[in-house]
Image (tube, coloured by chain):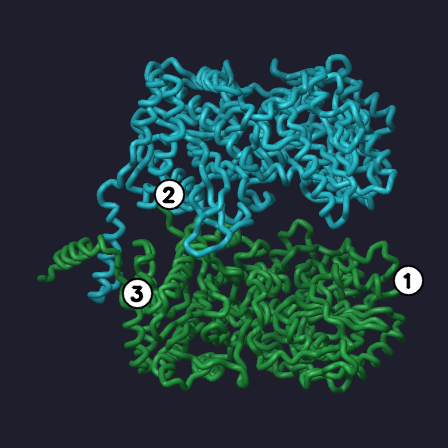
Chain colours: A green, B cyan
Amino acid sequence: MARAHWGCCPWLVLLCACAWGHPKPADLGGQDVRNCSTNPPYLPVTVVNTTVSLTALRQQMQTQNLSAYIIPDTDAHMNEYIGQHDERRAWITGFTGSAGTAVVTMKKAAVWTDSRYWTQAERQMDCNWELHKEVGTTPIVTWLLTEIPAGGCVGFDPFLLSIDTWESYNLALQGSNRQLVSITTNLVDLVWGSERPPVPNQPIYALQEAFTGSTWQEKVSGVRSQMQKHQKAPTAVLLSALEETAWLFNLRASDIPYNPFFYSYTLLTDSSIRLFANKSRFSSETLSYLNSSCTGPMCVQIEDYSQVRDSIQAYALGDVRIWIGTSYTMYGIYEVIPKEKLVTDTYSPVMMTKAVKNSKEQALLKASHVRDAVAVIRYLVWLEKNVPKGTVDEFSGAELMDKFRGEEQFSSGPSFETISASGLNAALAHYSPTKELNRKLSSDEMYLLDSGGQYWDGTTDITRTVHWGTPSAFQKEAYTRVLIGNIDLSRLIFPAATSGRMVEAFARRALWDAGLNYGHGTGHGIGNFLCVHEWPVGFQSNNIAMAKGMFTSIEPGYYKDGEFGIRLEDVALVVEAKTKYPGSYLTFEVVSFVPYDRNLIDVSLLSPEHLQYLNRYYQTIREKVGPELQRRQLLEEFKWLQQHTEPLAARAPDTASWASVLVVSTLAILGWSV
Amino acid sequence: MARAHWGCCPWLVLLCACAWGHPKPADLGGQDVRNCSTNPPYLPVTVVNTTVSLTALRQQMQTQNLSAYIIPDTDAHMNEYIGQHDERRAWITGFTGSAGTAVVTMKKAAVWTDSRYWTQAERQMDCNWELHKEVGTTPIVTWLLTEIPAGGCVGFDPFLLSIDTWESYNLALQGSNRQLVSITTNLVDLVWGSERPPVPNQPIYALQEAFTGSTWQEKVSGVRSQMQKHQKAPTAVLLSALEETAWLFNLRASDIPYNPFFYSYTLLTDSSIRLFANKSRFSSETLSYLNSSCTGPMCVQIEDYSQVRDSIQAYALGDVRIWIGTSYTMYGIYEVIPKEKLVTDTYSPVMMTKAVKNSKEQALLKASHVRDAVAVIRYLVWLEKNVPKGTVDEFSGAELMDKFRGEEQFSSGPSFETISASGLNAALAHYSPTKELNRKLSSDEMYLLDSGGQYWDGTTDITRTVHWGTPSAFQKEAYTRVLIGNIDLSRLIFPAATSGRMVEAFARRALWDAGLNYGHGTGHGIGNFLCVHEWPVGFQSNNIAMAKGMFTSIEPGYYKDGEFGIRLEDVALVVEAKTKYPGSYLTFEVVSFVPYDRNLIDVSLLSPEHLQYLNRYYQTIREKVGPELQRRQLLEEFKWLQQHTEPLAARAPDTASWASVLVVSTLAILGWSV
């Protein structure tokens, strides 16, 4: 789980927000909001004056003969996190929330956003802006039809609308005598001018071979082989998602917060490889690694990023068929390819191939999780000692967590903003503390930590919830039911190619049984030094079917508004299951290696099968993480690990006798004298 | 489950057939199939000569200037079972399978059907017909494009294509320079002429008030109130599904096999009620019951069935908005309503209201299940005595089952063709025995009985699988795992409005665990003397969410090709669940009251919770069915019931699992790796 988005597709954000019951945002130190109904209006100091920039934008609109201009919250690659230079909606409106669309007409300006951001928008926007407490294209178009005259044109930057979003605007405007007009020069950028933050320009580097599952040449050959086998015989694959190009060439950079990507496209044809990026960012070694001085089928020609649309358009003049994944292709590319030359799938072959990790990638991702566990355990041990002193707060805690992770080998920063939430704050969706606004950690409260790291060998994401004092019976029950959900899904055996949606209820059953539930999804894919929320793997209805070699998080939770929040998140590998009767069955192998909080487990709620699973898992943690702690002389942490992975014994009364009988017999079998 | 279709939507049939792994049809006494490649062709005696009728059809096509004519397997109401006079595809092709589309061009004729019917088609069709082993509109259109010239017209009867099917043909033909032409006179009917079986003409009767949940006046008011609350303010609701009209007016007849419906449409406006049917079929009492001699808003005007299209078209001339359920409206009605006057939902408000039974309907449906249990128990007792004699076969058994049901109060025949399958036949999808072709029941084999009844108070559907001898360990294990699946889903507690798709895996988990599964759906809705497969309730992805008051079957199974088949099907009511913490949760209350086969239950596989559930269920059966058996002096059956509902006890060490936990814990404590 992460703060801003959850899953790479924007709808997930909404799902999450809605299902969580629109919890009120954390008290951000006063709800000082604007009041535009007084004269003069009341504007808090947090408001940004947008009059000048709006006037300049309307001038640009006039030049283009537009009645309205749409400013979405996206960038050109459907990135989950977007760069500062892409935060056009935030800049023009003053409202910095991660989700929301702005529309400007010659007379009015308005923002549509979901309930998470209503207060924030009222604190940041001046009275030039209407706030619409709705989302989706339908309310926007309904508003547009009343605000702009018949015959009016609605402009948009085609690189900021996905094919689906464009189709939805187009459908809603059909027959309305208002026209959608694609304008490739972004009008906000023109107004933003020199104030606009620069596009990142750090070096793009190749991963060491030790950290890659295959060479880029092998990957390119693999994609070409899929092209040849495809019924519609595409002549090229076009990659628009940054993670696709990063994965294909084993290249990384740091253009995007938390994601080690760089702005790029790839056009991989049957006879050439064209990588669209800023050439000056490649060192001569990297250019040589890419074999970029030649023009053969295994030479990567670097072309300028800005040329991609023209180049695709020129390529499409030939007798070609271009294979795209429609989920990640923006309308700006789509509109220059004649429909009969398109071969469309929801996801590109790179997206689909990347979803299944080969054995080396699996080993790498597992190794990163062992080191990640060391960092998390160091932090949990430190908390256990320091929280009772009353000196730790959510923010300083998060900073220390990030620091410990940063000290791990191959670390490349956090994989998302650390969620460090104490007490009632843990019940808030998308909560993260700030230096100014945070809560002290206490032995009287539960504490939720959801965090992850980027390492050269893998990306991690883990959530643990702890209590250092005396949890209430309800807290223990809720925690244990969340744990049972995690175990029930993790140990489930299911047929190959089952959709995650069909099985995610196993993570909820123990909660449902008592009338409890959680309002978010149950898990998402994860990459090898790529996205922490790697689509299209997961448990949502539009995720692809489970297959051996995929990694997914498993993260049930429970949230009591105004009191506490629980989430237990592990990353798991999809593996073949050995079943009594032969068949193609799968199960999960958990690769997150941090024990759960014994203080919060009510053993009497666990079945023998749960206990058996849990004790085996703890044994695995000891085997994987123990030696690493010893090797690094982290003896206090080693001792903590041993204590926290002691096998749990059934506490059911009628089993006490069985326990003694069995212990005695086991010891007897082992030849011990009792 | 039933033989011909499963669920009212045609795709379900395919899903079922595909998922079941295309089992070969039962040995129908020789695979004597045609051979069109010899000269002269070889034609078995089962083939129908279609030359004359095809020539006549082509003359009709020529008159209409058609290059091709589509003959679907549907009727005008999306009925699951269709009347003989609607079996146009069967009559023109000779092929009588329940699924398959025929297309005739001036030179060729072809049938598309799924694997269940390939052999049957080769035994029944003469060499005028090509057999295409594919389904769906895409292969049909692909074939059409090669067979008919550019500019050619493809005719179809608009009352036999659903809106969706029409859209799919239309989309596939777009830009191909071939045109779809709607012809309201069915050309096959013209050729069929006087040989065509007559349209049923039995009386249409009103249900006694004792058997209805509400009066038709209350139902009409309820629908009108939904119209008023609807955002788009429809002025009328159009009902095309026969079950909608039957339900709305509490009227029944026997036009359709197994379904007590009559051919009809209803146009319910804000100020009038127009019922399209054959007026001569209503007695004066029924006309008076319908208040049909007046014209006010609570008077039912009977108009002729054949007038529906013209009447709708005329009504649509006014300032009106007609609310339809697109799933059950055929293109022949849809095409006469201007798009801007349509208010569309997937299902009509009648379909949605009917899905949730009120308390009286619940009581009625439950009562019919008690009597149905008596009939099934009588049959099971009889089998127990007679199967060892070697005198019972699948067909005579099915006849006796139907006879016992027929003797129950309020009986109105079976609700589908009884599936009576012994040994390997039970592993075949859609198997039903015939008088000529059937298998003897034996104490050495398992026997599967899937059957149901129509009663004035309710429709039933139950499957039991039994073994009178010594089942193999694998048969017992498989049976017990199917039973666990049934129990796990039946006792599940889940949030209100959960989709069935999200929870159906609970019926599979115990099978999956051992590498077993079943290839069909997990359940379907059921009506009050209506459809045995009442859409849209169920566990498929396109079923609607579960709500209190719905009834669904729960029917996991296991099928071992060539050996045996197991299915345990109960009907269950969705009820509120009492949870420890307050919330809106649901669970199931099983209303089928026949015990499972003790001979096939391996108690050691059941958890204490399963045993507790099962024993409670058995207690309920005793309470519900016992007194009924006693009242009717069915003392042998009463004794049998008591024996078969004896509480099951855990077979000693349910402690095996505890043992392993404790051994594991002990060894772990000792520092052993397990």
Residue topped by disc 2:
A581
The quadrant where residue A623 appears: bottom left
Give the number of marks. 3
The residue shown at (61%, 32%) is: B214
Judge the density around disc 3: few (<14), some (14-19), many (≥20) Cα neighbours within 10 Å.
Answer: many
Query: Of tags 3 and 1, which is closer to the observer?
Result: 1
Mark 1 crowd level (few <14, some 14–19, many ≥20, 10 Å Cα): few
Q: Residue furthest left?
A: A673
Mark 1: amino acid? Gly
SS type, badge 3 = helix
Disc 3 chain ID: A
Question: Which residue position is annotated with label 1?
Answer: A151
Between residues B53 and A90, which one lies in front from this camera angle? A90
Q: Which residue is mark 3?
A: A619
Task: Identify which residue is drawn at 55% across, 48% down.
Answer: B499
* Circle nearer the N terminus (2, 1): 1
Check the picture and name the quadrant holding the C terminus of chain B: bottom left
Q: Chain of mark 2?
A: A
Q: CA distance from mark 2 to mark 3?
A: 28 Å
N-terminal of the pair, mark 3 or mark 1, is 1
